[in-house]
Image (cartoon, grey):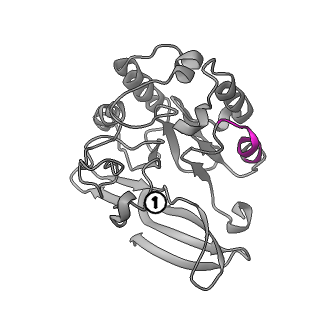
Amino acid sequence: MVHALNPDAILFVGDLDDGQIRIAKIINDLSIPTGIILGNHDKGIDTSGHQLKSQLDLLGDKDCGWGNCSWENLLISVVGARPCSAGGGYYLSEQVKSVYGHISIEESVDIIVNASRKLPSKLPLIILAHSGPTGLGSEVSSLCGRDWKASSIDWGDKDLELSIDKIKKERSVDLVVFGHMHHELRRGRGIRDTFYIDSTRGIAYLNAACVPRKGIDSNGTLLTHFSWVEFFNGKLMHASHRWYRDDFSLAYKEDLLN
């Protein structure tokens, strides 16, 4: 379906297949510009890090975690935040430590900021993360608000917030896109806020975690969800959630920025 929709590039926010390589193989075969960061489920259950490393090796330069991605003739650049994050401030799983080492929060910030410095400052910058940053609200419906316990708190990544602050002092940060926190809130508490623009700083935040991505509407039509953004003359001009039928036609669209 991705090729039929003809995007200029596609980004994956993680949680592919619980540590297995099936989806990573499919992503590896995509011929369009692709960037991905792995999520907390992707680390697998093997604490040696073998499952995680197998996916990273397969994805190669499509993996943006603690790194960056850019493509010839494509006028955007992407910095990857901390891979396999589960939110909640700062925490490294045993799998991540096995593959990357014992990275402190200060080191994580330095890695992300240094990755941004290797990209052209004239191009729009997208930060690709699995969990969003702290600082986007502590309500249950906030972009990174905890919804699985009665007391809601900000469950974002602290190192990502600190990285954004540092990068912003050197260049623009146009869009931060992430997943992890599902759109549908637990305990029947409604739908999460999924888009926010900090107009003072010129940064847009997009939560793309529509779970499940595939579903059936009230008419029995099978649908697939994508979050869609468009840049024009270096500026983010459009953002939406879209649901496509199996024949690639657009069934529903929720405009977030237009």
The correct choice, above or below, for 133 with respect to 6 in the image is above
Q: Residue at x 31, y 33 (%)?
A: 158
255 relative to 162 in the view: left or right: right
Secondary structure of the magenta portion, mostly? helix
Q: Is residue 24 magenta?
A: yes
The magenta span reads 19-26
**Quadrant in which the C terminus is drawn:** bottom left
The correct choice, above or below, for 32 with respect to 224 in the image is above
193 relative to 39 in the view: left or right: left
Q: For this rendering, which residue is in front, 100 or 121?
A: 100
The correct choice, above or below, for 42 with respect to 250 in the image is above
Q: Residue at x 54, y 23 (%)?
A: 96
**Residue 227, percent from left and from top:** 52, 62
**Residue 31, percent from left and from top:** 76, 50
The correct choice, above or below, for 195 with respect to 178 in the image is below
Q: Residue at x 52, y 20 (%)?
A: 94
The type of residue carrying mark 1 is: Asn
Q: For this rendering, which residue is in front, 252 or 138?
A: 138
**Residue 117, percent from left and from top:** 44, 29
**Residue 65 figure quarter:** top right
**Residue 181, percent from left and from top:** 42, 50
250 relative to 186 in the view: left or right: right
Crowdedness near tag 1: few (<14), some (14–19) or many (≥20) residues, C-alpha within 10 Å: few
**Quadrant in which the N terminus is drawn:** bottom right
Asked if residue 50 shows in the view, the reply is yes
Q: Secondary structure at mark 1?
A: loop
Q: Is residue 91 magenta?
A: no
Q: Which residue is mark 1?
A: 233
